[in-house]
Image (spheres, rainbow, N blue to C red):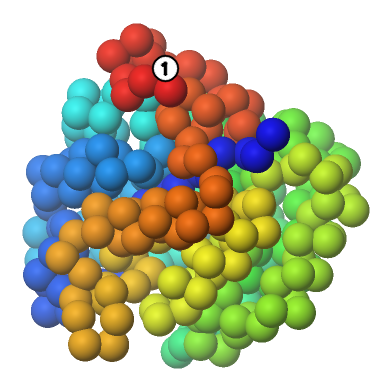
Amino acid sequence: MTTPCIICVAITGSLPTKANNPAVPITVAEQVESTQEAFEAGATIVHAHVRNHDETQSSDPEKFAALKEGIEKHCPGMIIQFSTGGRSGAGQTRGGMLPLVPDMASLSVGSNNFPTRVYENPPDLVDWLASEMLAYDVKPEIEAFDLSHILKAKDMAGKGQLVGTPYIQFVMGVKNAMPVDRDVFDYYIQTVKRLFGDDAPWCAAGIGANQLKLNEWAIAAGGHARTGLEDNVRLDRDTLAPSNAALVRRAVEICERNDRPVASWQEARSILGLRLPENASKGRAA
């Protein structure tokens, strides 16, 4: 039986602005509306950052709380994943929203280069973020910018810092980090299966124009896909994406071409081993 494809939509991020694309949602209200459109188009995970009204990055737990409330109301059943990425804050402020108990949170387990700086994830901070996720029953999504990050996830799982089978996302195409390389991509998949088993779920994200290529590779290879305006503001070189939903619909079309059913929120939660939300009965049907 073909595994349904989970589509994650990264709606905002920390960098894209309305100057880059007017469709980038900044306020909580805009983010909720954009998420609902993406949910109705087929996304079952929302990867969320929050912003200040001047579009600068924020790690304000109150903003995260308002966003979570809005998504739960308008997208019942959707998996809410908060970002603990380093562009939104420093040190333990990056995990200040974890007591809100989202379903998931991103977890970068090692450092690497970004376009203009080092993306620092020191071991003590990684350990603390992982411990907070354990304490609040938040499932990490391991962001693998490098092969060593997959091996680090195995080490952490062996120490009990991660519960269950990790969900690992390959991030490719960040300038100065791992480029988009098919041989490396295939080896990432082999490594996940070798370390965690053939049925271990994994996802892939491509940055900029590479988003489409990574969506195609991941869906065809049996993995899950991330799309959204955080990673890519265009449909092609000459066309801005009109919405997050438009990028989700493109991923759905790739699923259809590859005979992959798109996961409902119920199927996505089952694949990832997540609890059902209290408002589960109101969600989009499987």
Q: Is residue 62 above or below residue 100?
A: below
Q: How many marks?
A: 1
Q: Residues within 10 Å of mark 1 (few under 14, many from 20)?
A: some
Dividing the picture into quadrants, the one containing residue 121 is: bottom right
Please tell me which residue lies in front, 134 or 13.
13
Residue at 44% from the left image edge and 72% from the top image edge: 212
Please tell me which residue lies in front, 31 or 93.
31
Dividing the picture into quadrants, the one containing residue 218 is: bottom right
Assign the C terminus to one quadrant of the image: top left
Please tell me which residue lies in front, 263 or 52.
263
Q: Is residue 31 above or below residue 77?
A: below
- Residue 247 is situated, as x and y percent measured from the top left of the image, at 31, 61
Q: On the image, numbered disc 1 is attached to which residue?
A: 277
Residue at 48% from the left image edge and 24% from the top image edge: 266
- Residue 27 is situated, as x and y percent measured from the top left of the image, at 12, 52
Q: Is 189 situated left or right of 22 in this image?
A: right
Residue at 31% from the left image edge and 54% from the top image edge: 249
Please tell me which residue lies in front, 273 or 162.
273
Q: Is 221 situated left or right of 267 in this image?
A: right
- Residue 148 is situated, as x and y percent measured from the top left of the image, at 78, 68
Q: Is 186 situated left or right of 101 in this image?
A: right
Q: Is residue 95 above or below residue 281?
A: below
For residue 24, say whether it is visible. yes
For residue 161, say whether it is visible. no
Amino acid type indicated by mark 1: Pro
Residue at 69% from the left image edge and 34% from the top image edge: 1
| Callout 1 secondary element | loop
- Residue 70 is situated, as x and y percent measured from the top left of the image, at 19, 31
